[in-house]
Amino acid sequence: MTYDRLVCANCAAPVSEGRCPVCRANRARLQQEGFFAGMNPMALIALLAVLIAAVALLAHQTA
Ligand SMILES: [Zn+2]
Protein backbone atom coordinates (compact mmCIF):
# COMPACT_ATOMS: atom_id res chain seq x y z
CA MET A 1 0.00 0.00 0.00
CA THR A 2 1.47 3.31 -1.06
CA TYR A 3 1.00 6.58 0.79
CA ASP A 4 3.04 8.74 -1.58
CA ARG A 5 -0.04 10.36 -3.10
CA LEU A 6 -2.05 10.53 0.09
CA VAL A 7 -3.02 14.13 0.86
CA CYS A 8 -3.40 15.28 4.46
CA ALA A 9 -6.83 16.52 5.52
CA ASN A 10 -5.22 18.95 7.97
CA CYS A 11 -2.61 20.78 5.86
CA ALA A 12 -3.53 19.58 2.32
CA ALA A 13 0.09 18.64 1.65
CA PRO A 14 1.27 15.13 0.76
CA VAL A 15 1.39 13.00 3.92
CA SER A 16 4.81 11.68 2.84
CA GLU A 17 6.27 15.18 3.38
CA GLY A 18 5.24 15.17 7.04
CA ARG A 19 4.51 18.92 7.29
CA CYS A 20 2.17 18.74 10.28
CA PRO A 21 1.66 16.43 13.29
CA VAL A 22 -1.29 14.76 11.52
CA CYS A 23 0.93 14.00 8.52
CA ARG A 24 3.70 12.61 10.69
CA ALA A 25 1.26 10.46 12.70
CA ASN A 26 -0.32 9.07 9.55
CA ARG A 27 3.06 8.48 7.95
CA ALA A 28 4.35 6.65 11.05
CA ARG A 29 1.20 4.55 11.23
CA LEU A 30 1.34 3.61 7.55
CA GLN A 31 5.03 2.78 7.76
CA GLN A 32 4.37 0.61 10.79
CA GLU A 33 1.54 -1.18 8.99
CA GLY A 34 3.81 -1.76 6.01
CA PHE A 35 6.51 -3.08 8.29
CA PHE A 36 4.15 -5.51 9.98
CA ALA A 37 2.58 -6.54 6.68
CA GLY A 38 6.01 -7.35 5.27
CA MET A 39 7.08 -9.15 8.41
CA ASN A 40 3.90 -11.07 9.17
CA PRO A 41 4.39 -14.11 6.88
CA MET A 42 7.88 -14.73 8.25
CA ALA A 43 6.75 -14.24 11.85
CA LEU A 44 3.79 -16.53 11.22
CA ILE A 45 6.03 -19.28 9.84
CA ALA A 46 8.43 -18.91 12.79
CA LEU A 47 5.54 -19.00 15.25
CA LEU A 48 4.11 -22.09 13.54
CA ALA A 49 7.48 -23.84 13.67
CA VAL A 50 7.80 -23.09 17.40
CA LEU A 51 4.25 -24.29 17.98
CA ILE A 52 4.84 -27.55 16.09
CA ALA A 53 8.09 -28.13 18.01
CA ALA A 54 6.32 -27.48 21.32
CA VAL A 55 3.47 -29.84 20.45
CA ALA A 56 5.91 -32.52 19.27
CA LEU A 57 7.93 -32.16 22.46
CA LEU A 58 4.77 -32.34 24.59
CA ALA A 59 3.50 -35.39 22.70
CA HIS A 60 6.88 -37.06 23.10
CA GLN A 61 6.96 -36.40 26.83
CA THR A 62 3.40 -37.59 27.51
CA ALA A 63 3.55 -40.70 25.31
ZN1 LIG B 1 -0.71 17.44 7.38
Image (cartoon, rainbow, N blue to C red):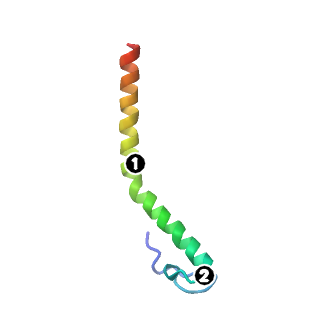
Q: Report the amino acid beneath label 2.
A: Cys
Residue 11's tag is none
Q: Which circle's residue, 1 or 2, is located before the other in the chain?
A: 2
Circle 2 crowding by C-alpha within 10 Å: few under 14, some 14–19, many from 20: some
SS class, disc 1: helix
Residue farthest along the top direction in this orientation: 63
Q: Residue under circle 1? A: 43
Residue farthest to the right? 10
Q: Where residue 5 sits: x, y (%)? A: 47, 81
Residue at x 56%, y 84% (from the top left corner)? 19
Where residue 2 appears, as percent x and y from the top left, is: 44, 73
42 versus 63 height, above or below: below
For label 2, the SS is: loop
Tell me: residue 28, above or below residue 42: below
Q: Does the residue labelled 2 lie within 8 Å of ligand 1?
A: yes
Q: Is mark 1 within 8 Å of ligand 1?
A: no
Residue identifier under label 2: 20
Query: How far from the left and from the top, in percent, is residue 4?
Result: 45, 79
Q: In which quarter of the image is ligand 1?
A: bottom right
Q: Residue furthest bottom?
A: 12
Identify which residue is drawn at 52% across, 83% down.
Answer: 14
User: Which of the 4 image quadrants contains residue 36?
Assistant: bottom left
Q: Which quarter of the rendering shows the C terminus? A: top left
x and y, in percent, of residue 17 in the image: 50, 82
Q: Quadrant of residue 38?
A: bottom left
Looking at numbered disc 1 in the image, what kind of residue is underneath it? Answer: Ala
Residue at (43%, 58%) from the top-left corner? 37
Q: How far apart are marks 1 and 2 (CA)?
A: 33 Å
- Please state, as top left, top right, bottom left or bottom right, where the N terminus lies in the image: bottom left
